[in-house]
Amino acid sequence: MTLRRGLAGSCAVLLGLAVLVATAPTAGAEPCGSPGVIGSGPLGSLGSGSGGSGSSGGLPAQGPQGPLPTLDSGPTRTVAWVTGPRSINDTYERFTISGTDLGIMWDNGGEGEDRQLLMAFGDTFGNCSVPGQQWRHNVLMRSTDTGLEDGIDVPDPVPGDLRAGSPVLLEDPDFSRELVGSLGLEGVEVTVIPTAGIAVDGVQYLNLMSVRAWGEHGEWWTNASMIATSGNNGETWTIQPSTVRLNLPVDVPGLRQVSQGNENFQQHAYVRHEEYVYDFGTPQGRFGAAHLSRVPADALLDLAAYEYWNGQEWVPDDPSAAVPVLPAAVGEMSVAHLGGKFVVLYGNEMLGRIEMRTAERPEGPWSEPRVLVTAQQIGGLYAPYIHPWSSGNDLYFTASSWGDYNVMLLRTTLS
């Protein structure tokens, strides 16, 4: 199989004016999940990969994925791999995916047979033995599986089928294609990664961050965050220029989105409640606090319609007014409204663990953190994303294993 790259539109045009002034430390990149791969490494200094090979040399074509780690104590258990050659979905043979991460999940808003779970993944690799490792910056999978006790089943990809397992091209029917492109240049724009997704009135909204460079242990530098939309169930995506929140010291006449406070909304987490979409934001990397905004659900693309929580009231159109609702360090967070409460999961980089909090309202006050998984239990685990179809006392979520560079499903109890 030859090296193939995604054909979707790149946000590079939007960021060209900004990257000219971009400078940041760089980190080595070795694809296919080896230590030092694209990305900033596993959660916490205590973490180490549970199945990685430790070297990019001599990696098998199918990558470094090992057996599913197990948890023998506490309320959380691993369920199954979602991605990778060892997963129930055999993503290497069916989607040409040996390794990927994140697995952000949201309900597509459909009814009956059209209702599906959409999952957005970050940097994705195929055959690890070929030049370039068939790198894609982001991919999408779909599922209708509601029986989560044995994992998440993804149907086969079918070219042109908007309900099939993953967007693919007719000439590459077993190759999950890239959704939104990137320059792919370290120090300028190395990748574009999804951070949150939501559906409103049949339209899919995907928030992405443009990463300028990777650092060490939870550090990275972004150019901007932005929203892409899809009207065909995630098959194709269009970047919306009006939603770009720049994170660079530049002055661009006529672009109102260059404003103080947007640095706190480089990564996002969405939850729908009543007539609003609540949009939690964190800065670049994993060491910042979480801030909160909200917007009428039908105005997600209008930055002027957002309100920001200042600790006492909602302030319109001023991201600098937002104060932390969750203290640092909050990394790769997700939020859901379950059982009458708001539930948030995130990685705590400083303590090397995945934490959960609950609240009656999005603005809090939030409970003290409950520890779900530590780096001592499973090394190199990061990016917990809540499954929106969790019910009862069972909270299902995905998390990524750094050494295996793949995504697993876990379950914990809310009681």
Image (cartoon, helix red, strand yellow):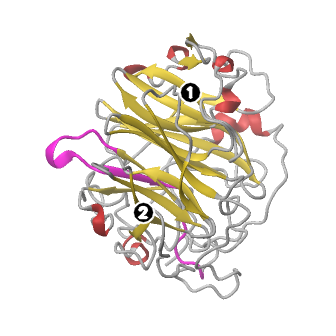
Question: Of 173 and 290, which appears nearest the observer?
Answer: 290
Q: Residue 112's x, y, as percent?
A: 14, 45
Q: Is mark 2 on a helix, strand or loop?
A: strand
Callouts 2 and 1 close, C-beta under 8 Å: no
Label 1 crowd (10 A; few <14 / some 14-19 / many >=20): many
Asked whether 116 falls inside the magenta stretch, the response is yes
Say what amino acid the circle numbered 2 marks: Leu
Q: Residue 63's x, y, as percent?
A: 55, 79
- Determine whether 392 is above or below 341 in the image: below
> In the image, what residue occupies the spot 79% across and 22% down?
251
Q: Is residue 23 left or right of residue 294?
A: right
Q: In which quarter of the image is residue 11?
A: top right
User: For the magenta stretch, what is the residue range?
Assistant: 107-129
> In the image, what residue occupies the spot 37% across and 60% down?
168
Asked whether 369 falls inside the magenta stretch, the response is no
Q: Residue 202's x, y, as percent?
A: 29, 34
In the rendered structure, find residue 402 and report the number of the disc placed on it. none
Q: Is mark 1 on a helix, strand or loop?
A: strand
Residue that badge 1 annotates: 292
Residue that badge 2 annotates: 410
Say what amino acid the circle numbered 1 marks: Leu
Question: Of 348 and 151, which appears nearest the observer?
Answer: 348
The reply to whether residue 123 is visible in this rendering is: no
Q: Residue 103's x, y, as percent?
A: 46, 56
